[in-house]
Image (tube, rainbow, N blue to C red):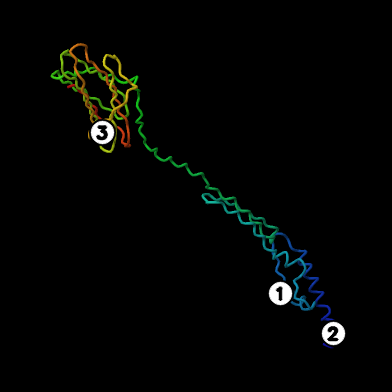
Amino acid sequence: MNDATVSHVASWLPWTAVARADRMRAMHTPGRLLVVPAVLLTLAACANGTDDLLPGYYEEQAGGGGLGGDGGAGGEDLSVSSSSSSSVSVGSTGAGGVEGEGGDAGSNEGDGGAGGGGGAVVECDYAAPNTCTGAEDLGEISGDDGGDSVTLTERGTTSKWFKVYVVDKFNVPGSEVFKATLTSPPGMNFDLIVYPGELEVDAPDCFASGVRGQGTPESFTTTWNDRAGPDDHLWFAIEVRHVEGTACGSEATWTLTVKGY
């Protein structure tokens, strides 16, 4: 083969290969993949002096990859999560589907329960429920020397007022006697205060000067003349006064006793 013949063949082969490739593309039908002879494709690429693929053909057969979707937003204190995905294909070799966005995560936030309130400090009320003018009446006892000895007993846990009537049963010369005793419980201190009345006055004297009991337990004792003529009856007002101590109930119970001669 001479030089003219070689030149003619060299210039003819690339265009012939391209034309045959175009005809083969035109014969392509959906769902069927046609294989182009590797020799012709190689010759066409070499003859054009480039490594590029044929326009459209390989690009269609090797479509670009799909785009990844955004990841779902993370929730706080995850307790439940959900996600969804979808894909789309284009042609026989279309682009990869777009990944769906992840669902929002559930929230597990909750308000904490209120705390319980602290226990209340128990405080007892030691105030007197009455006054001197409304003092509780203990009745009467005999104050005669040699008479019947009667003891009256009262108990309580607060300050309190009492009154007692000491009577002269025997109108003979002698003495009248009255005694009151107050016993406080351990850890508590109640004072005994006595207000003597006046002879021949039929009522306690709430304005008299009080006399405090002495000793432990606290005690008050007084005597007066038993005259031969008139009766020598006498009223006494008695105050039990809380001074110190914080016990309550039975632990705060004091005992008061009163008696005549």
SS at mark 3 in the image: loop
Task: Work out which quarter of the rendered image holds the N terminus and state it.
Answer: bottom right
Q: Nearer the viewer, residue 43 or 76?
A: 76
Crowding near the residue tagged with mark 3, few <14, some 14–19, many ≥20 C-alpha atoms within 10 Å: many
The part of the image, by quadrant, that contains residue 199 is: top left
Question: From mark 3 to mark 2, how far is it between C-alphas?
Answer: 144 Å
Residue closest to the eye, 216 or 226: 226
> The residue under label 2 is which amino acid type?
Thr
Q: Is 217 located above or below residue 40 in the figure?
A: above
Task: Name the residue beneath numbered marker 1.
Answer: 38
Give the Cα separation between the discs numbered 1 and 3: 122 Å
Q: Position of residue 143 (x, y in %)?
A: 19, 19
Above or below, 160 against 7 in this view is: above
Q: Mark 2 — residue?
A: 5
| CA separation in Å, label 2 and label 1 | 25 Å
Which quadrant holds residue 169? Answer: top left
- Badge 2: residue crowd in 10 Å (few <14, some 14–19, many ≥20): few
Q: Left or right of 94: which side holds 216? A: left
Rendered image quadrant of residue 212: top left
Q: Nearer the viewer, residue 221 or 74?
A: 221
Which of pointers 3 and 2 lies earlier in the amino acid sequence? 2
Q: Earlier in the sequence, mark 2 or mark 1?
A: 2
Density class for disc 1 (Cα within 10 Å; few <14, some 14-19, many ≥20) is few
Give the farthest residue toward the top.
Answer: 229
Vertical placement of 229 versus 90: above or below?
A: above
Which residue does the numbered mark 3 point to in the structure image?
A: 184
